[in-house]
Image (cartoon, rainbow, N blue to C red):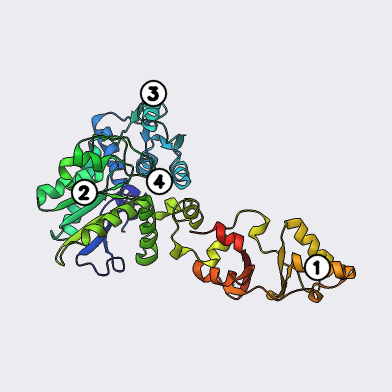
Amino acid sequence: MDYKDSVLNLIGHTPLVKLNKLTKGLNPLVLGKMESLNPGGSVKDRIGISMIDAAEREGALKPGGTVVEATSGNTGIGVALVCAVRGYKAVFVMTDKCSVEKVRYLKALGSDVVVVPVAAKPDSPDHYVNTARRIAKETPNSLFVFQYGNTANPLAHYQSTGPEIWEQTEGRLTHFVSGIGTGGTISGVGRFLKETSPKIKVVGADPYGSVFKTYKETGQLLQATPYLVEGIGQEIIPENVHMKYIDQIINVTDRDSFLMARRLAREEGIFCGGSTGTSAVAALQVAKDLDKDQVVVFIVCDTGERYLSKFHSDEWMKEKRMLGAERMTLGLINQLKSEGPDRRLVSVRPDQKVSEALEIMNTYGFSQLPVLEEGKSVGSIREGKLMSKLLDKRELMDAPVADVMDKSFPVISEDISYEGAVKHLRNSQAILVEEYGRIVGIVTRHDMLSAQP
């Protein structure tokens, strides 16, 4: 029979996947190391088992003990897997910047989660690392893992990830690209590759606002500024960041990171997180200047399922003003309309009384309504014109809507672009949104202005 003793035996030996569409016009081979296929869904599974193994060997973690860690989520999940299998209690401290999916994942694995403000500075007792350190100190028979200084972190990548990439590329690798967070991945892999072939270039991908690029280039530690990408970047230099193995660091914006992660899903079928987007942007930037015989490998850090409430959500991207105009379709504008009664389609039938139509308009505060019959648009009611008719002929209040309605609003397919929708609204107060033959919404000029990219 072919089986594994536990899910921990599934960690590592992840495949390389070639980028095809995103590399059009580029010479080198660009490959993603699919760490998202680890059982816990991220590259951090490797260090989770490595750090717990080391603690057990050293006697720092005893049966029935409690593991405490400060994490942005993925290391926590990697550690939680080990704790679940081996019977340890786990407590993780995260900031309120982390996605709700990660918090729920950790709780589903039986862990306790403490959430602290992301704004807390490194010298504050509320900082997530300091909070984790305090909890470990106050908890009997506990271990503070501290991935930022734990030598088993980069060692895991030196012993596994680096050798795997070298073997999978048959030694043809020329450039390795990784985000920098704790430093474990880039330092461990970088050390192995440099020792194996000093010509290999190791490139760090870092969000704007993080301190790594400036520190690498000037030796100065500037104050970090906020950024939205999770799991990479820092406001200090962790012990596990070994700059001697890093040749270059490329800054990438939040917007570019998130849009690239979304493109990886839509164009390559690689469903990933924002830090993978950061690394992919850097990898493609590096690839622009390379020859055909060169090979670039970047880390696909984790799965996009952890960010469904964040940048994989059009609503979230729109809220953060990062959704490109190329994604803004009429259907999306209809979906993004504010919560409340105007989010659903309110209409009247042609056989309803005018008085009923006025009551509906007053109830919802609308100045215009589509008239639908069996799901098809047959006309419209506009407050100004209707009031003018009623002033001349009061008895129309009891007449059917069909007797007073105006021509229908244009019915436009939901996949039309923002610019295309604007053209229709120049000649109409509103347009109806059609999705697969059904009218599903109405978009007004005000809605378009609110949704403007």
Question: Horizontal and vertical percent for residue 378?
Answer: 71, 77
Which mark is first along the chain, 1 or 4?
4
Q: Nearer the viewer, residue 319 or 308?
A: 319
Residue type, numbered disc 2:
Ser
* Label 3: how many Cα within 10 Å (few below 14, some 14–19, many 20+): few
Numbered disc in front, either 4 or 1: 1
| Whether residue 59 is situated above or below residue 107 in the rendered picture | above
Numbered disc in front, either 1 or 3: 1
Q: What residue is pinned by disc 1?
A: 388
Residue type, numbered disc 4:
Leu
The disc at residue 228 is 4
Is residue 194 in view?
yes
- The quadrant where residue 395 appears: bottom right
Tags 4 and 3 touching, CB below 8 Å: no
- The quadrant where residue 283 appears: bottom left
Which mark is first along the chain, 3 or 4?
3
Question: Horizontal and vertical percent for residue 110?
Answer: 45, 40
Numbered disc in front, either 2 or 4: 4
Number of on-image labels: 4
The disc at residue 160 is 2
